[in-house]
Image: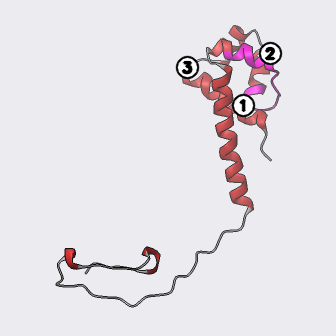
Amino acid sequence: MILLRRLLGDVLRRQRQRQGRTLREVSSSARVSLGYLSEVERGQKEASSELLSAICDALDVRMSELMREVSDELALAELAQSAAATEPVPTPVRPRLNSVSVRGVPPERVTIKAPAEAVDVVAA
């Protein structure tokens, strides 16, 4: 199961770490307890919109940028989850075609009129 609070916490942590800032610095700027901010970053607590706004202000990041990054992470997680849930699709077996040798024929003189997926051309 994909938890939005975990994705949000991961993105917040990356934003903070990109700036080289500590939890203490951001919690002080956002006026949020250090422990609570830590729990939000670890995805253990759901952050309210007011709290997210304060954290974004402290990180000098637009909330829309934060949410866009979370949305991208969510899309990737959903793709990975659906790929893991489905059975692998077998590769279709293509019939083997007769080989044609064009050795000694200049390349500009070779013309093949057939659908590309039906012909295997091997330069010799």
> How far is mark 2 from mark 1, CA to CA?
14 Å
> Relative to residue 76, is residue 49 drawn left or right?
right
Residues tagged 3 and 2 counted as in contact (Cβ below 8 A): no
Please say whether residue 93 is one of the residues in the magenta stretch. Answer: no
Q: For residue 55, which quarter of the picture?
A: top right
Q: Earlier in the sequence, mark 3 or mark 2?
A: 3
Tell me the magenta residue range: 40-56
Mark 3 surroundings: few (<14), some (14-19) or many (≥20) residues within 10 A: few
Amino acid type shown at disc 1: Leu
Residues tagged 2 and 1 counted as in contact (Cβ below 8 A): no
Q: For residue 59, which quarter of the picture?
A: top right
Q: Percent from the top left, x then y, of residue 107?
A: 21, 75
The residue pinned by badge 2 equals 50
The residue pinned by badge 1 equals 8
> Relative to residue 106, is residue 76 drawn left or right?
right
Mark 1 surroundings: few (<14), some (14-19) or many (≥20) residues within 10 A: many
Instruction: Specify the label residue 19 is tagged with.
Output: 3
The residue drawn where x is 55% and y is 82% is: 93
Q: Relative to 79, is 109 above or below?
A: below
Secondary element type, mark 3:
loop
> Relative to residue 41, is residue 110 drawn left or right?
left
The residue drawn where x is 58% and y is 75% is: 91
> Relative to residue 19, is residue 35 drawn left or right?
right
Q: Nearer the viewer, residue 81 or 122?
A: 122
The residue drawn where x is 75% and y is 60% is: 85
Q: Percent from the top left, x then y, of residue 118?
A: 46, 80
Instruction: Specify the label residue 74 is tagged with.
Output: none
> How far is mark 1 from mark 3, CA to CA?
17 Å
Q: Nearer the viewer, residue 31 or 109?
A: 109
